[in-house]
Amino acid sequence: MSFPINRPRRLRKNETIRRLVRENRISVDDLVQPLFVVPGKNIKTEIDSLPGQYHLSVDRTAEEASRITTLGIPAIILFGIPEKKDSLGSEAYAENGIIQRAVREIKKTAPDLLIITDVCLCEYTDHGHCGVIKDNRVSNDPTLELLAKTALSHARAGADIVAPSDMMDGRVAAIRKTLDENGFNDIPILSYAVKYASAYYGPFRDAAGSAPQFGDRKGYQMDPANALEAFREVELDLDEGADIIMVKPGVAYLDILTGVKQKFGCVTAVYQVSGEYAMIEAAAKMNLIDRKAIITETLLSFKRAGADFILTYHASEVAEWLKEK
């Protein structure tokens, strides 16, 4: 029987019943806060392209990590801006590099907070690409050794999860092998398996100083037109030992996020990237949207699509909202 027997509005008539039957919810347990670490001391400088986000020195990063812990957020992800750059991104895997120092300091102030480290070379190379340059292009296989060295240096510093974001073929296997051979077989790999060559990354590249100095990243990041290729990338990374799969960006790729979760059933993360954040902030500043409602609705869309957790620049603020309930 259909109408008038079936009336879906019965289960929408007030907030109490809507809460009772709600399919998806945002919890503080779903949130990961990105942080940008810079050289120096006592530095907290707002990032112009990411209003409300900051460049933090190691000491201030540790303070922020401690605050994030009090909010109940389970994890952060760190991005580093080094003191110097070179063609091989050597500061990425230096024993006393910016991320390595930050990880050690955070472990003193917030020992229970999960630290995820971004494993890539783009912030550390003078050419801004994610790997070794040969003949004016990124050479895949020589890059793998440097990525593995970076992941190992992060693990040695105390990182809980390493997250390769470079999109080189075979990097998960190279990292897994190196970690295992050095006694870090219990460190999970969060693979940016599905990372599109997206126009949504602009504010991040400004914040991290990682824009390529020539060409673009379309030769290694995925074509936004492709969906089946994403599933192939996930399959390969899982076979190589990835523990968690990332889809990036978020809103424009909800179909991919759902497809990955349904097809593979693995732990799946999504990154609400800098451009998505900046667009919300710009529209809110112009009073074109209800900022809190848009943030909440967007995060719910990720959960509905299949995300187990969400990397978002709004994490700390959303956690504060949740505490108020």
Image (cartoon, rainbow, N blue to C red):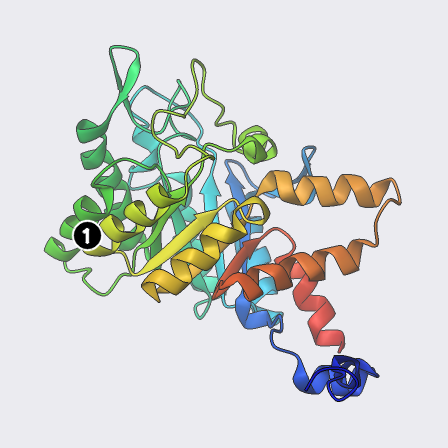
* Within-10-Å neighbours for mark 1: few <14, some 14–19, many 20+: some
Residue 55: % across, % down: 60, 40
Which quadrant is home to the C terminus?
bottom right
Callout 1 amino acid: Glu
> Considering depth in this image, is 286 or 179 the residue closer to the camera?
286
Q: Is residue 240 above or below residue 205?
A: below
Residue at left offset 61%, top offset 33%:
203
Q: Secondary structure at mark 1?
A: helix
Q: Is residue 228 above or below residue 4?
A: above
Residue 93: % across, % down: 29, 38
Q: Is 103 placed left or right of 208 in the picture?
A: left
Number of numbered discs overlaid on the protein picture: 1
Q: Is residue 54 visible?
A: yes
Residue 100: % across, % down: 36, 46
* Residue 222 falls in image quadrant: top left
Which quadrant is home to the N terminus?
bottom right
Circle 1 is placed at which residue position? Answer: 240
Residue 178: % across, % down: 15, 49
Q: Is residue 1 above or below residue 59?
A: below
* Residue 28 falls in image quadrant: bottom right
Q: Is 309 placed left or right of 141 in the picture?
A: right
> Considering depth in this image, is 23 or 172 the residue closer to the camera?
23
Residue at left offset 52%, top offset 44%:
249
Q: Is 292 placed left or right of 319 in the picture?
A: right
* Residue 186 falls in image quadrant: bottom left
Residue at left offset 38%, top offset 47%:
192
Q: Is residue 153 above or below residue 261?
A: above
Single out the residue that lies furthest toward the left: 181
Q: Is residue 159 visible?
A: no
